[in-house]
């Protein structure tokens, strides 16, 4: 399980993947006790952003990989820790490249 601390005014990557699909599990704890963060997915290959909204307490998020992705978290109202772990598998089997 990975821990990321987010302070007010910061936007951080809490999880990133390359060519995976699955579920991301999270638990948020904050010094203020609100236990919430705003979140969005940044997805490759072009870096498009998908707003997830507010994450609170603990839960799970399904994700699919085209090539890569990042879960960005922000809008902390105090020092906030998000713990993440995943249950994932390879999303796409690309053909071998021969030169």
Image (tube, grey):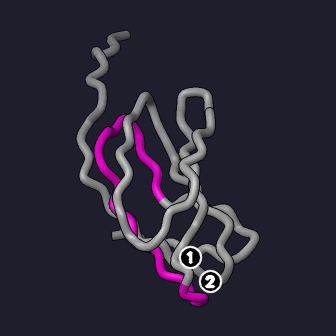
Q: Position of residue 33 (x, y in %)?
A: 54, 87
The image's mark for residue 15 is none
Q: Which type of secondary structure does the marked residue at label 1 adopt? A: strand
Q: Is residue 85 left or right of residue 38?
A: left
* Front in this rendered view, residue 58 or 7: 58
Q: Position of residue 96 (x, y in %)?
A: 28, 16
User: Which residue is depicted at the point 38% across and 70% down?
Assistant: 58
Q: Return the x and y of residue 94 as percentages of the image width and height.
A: 31, 20
Label ID, residue 79:
2
- Picture quarter with the C terminus: top left
Q: Residue at the location (26% across, 36% down)? A: 90
- Asked if the residues shown at circle 2 and circle 1 are in contact, with their CB atoms under 8 angstroms apart, the answer is yes
User: Which residue is found at the position 56% from the left and 81% from the top?
Assistant: 34
Circle 1 residues within 10 Å: few <14, some 14–19, many ≥20 = some
Query: Front-most of 91 and 37?
Result: 37
The stretch of residues the image draws in magenta is: 15-33
The reply to whether the magenta stretch includes residue 30 is yes
Q: Does the stretch in magenta take in 73?
A: no
* Local crowd size for mark 2, using a 10 Å CA cut-off: few (<14), some (14–19), many (≥20): some
Looking at the image, which is closer to me, 61 or 47? Answer: 61
Mark 2 vs mark 1: in front: 2
Residue 19 left/right relative to 31: left
61 shown above or below 76: above
SS assignment at label 2: loop
Vertical order, 37 against 16 (above or below) = below
Please report the residue visible at 54 percent of the width from the left and 27 percent of the height from the top.
45
Of the 4 image quadrants, the one containing the N terminus is: bottom left
Task: Label the magenta part by its dominant secondary structure.
Answer: strand
Q: In the rendered image, which quarter is residue 79 located in?
A: bottom right
**Disc on the earlier residue, 2 or 1:** 1
The numbered dot on residue 5 is 1
* Left or right relative to 57: residue 50: right
């Amino acid at each position: 399980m990975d821990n990321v601390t987010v302070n007010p005014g910061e936007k951080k990557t809490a999880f990133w993947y390359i060519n995976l699909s699955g579920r991301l599990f999270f638990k948020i704890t904050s010094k203020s006790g609100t236990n919430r963060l705003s979140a969005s997915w940044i997805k490759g290959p072009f870096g498009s952003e998908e707003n997830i909204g507010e994450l609170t307490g603990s839960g799970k998020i399904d994700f699919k990989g085209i090539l890569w992705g990042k879960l960005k978290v922000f809008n902390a109202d105090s020092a906030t820790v998000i713990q993440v772990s995943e249950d994932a598998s390879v999303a796409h089997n690309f053909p071998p490249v021969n030169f």
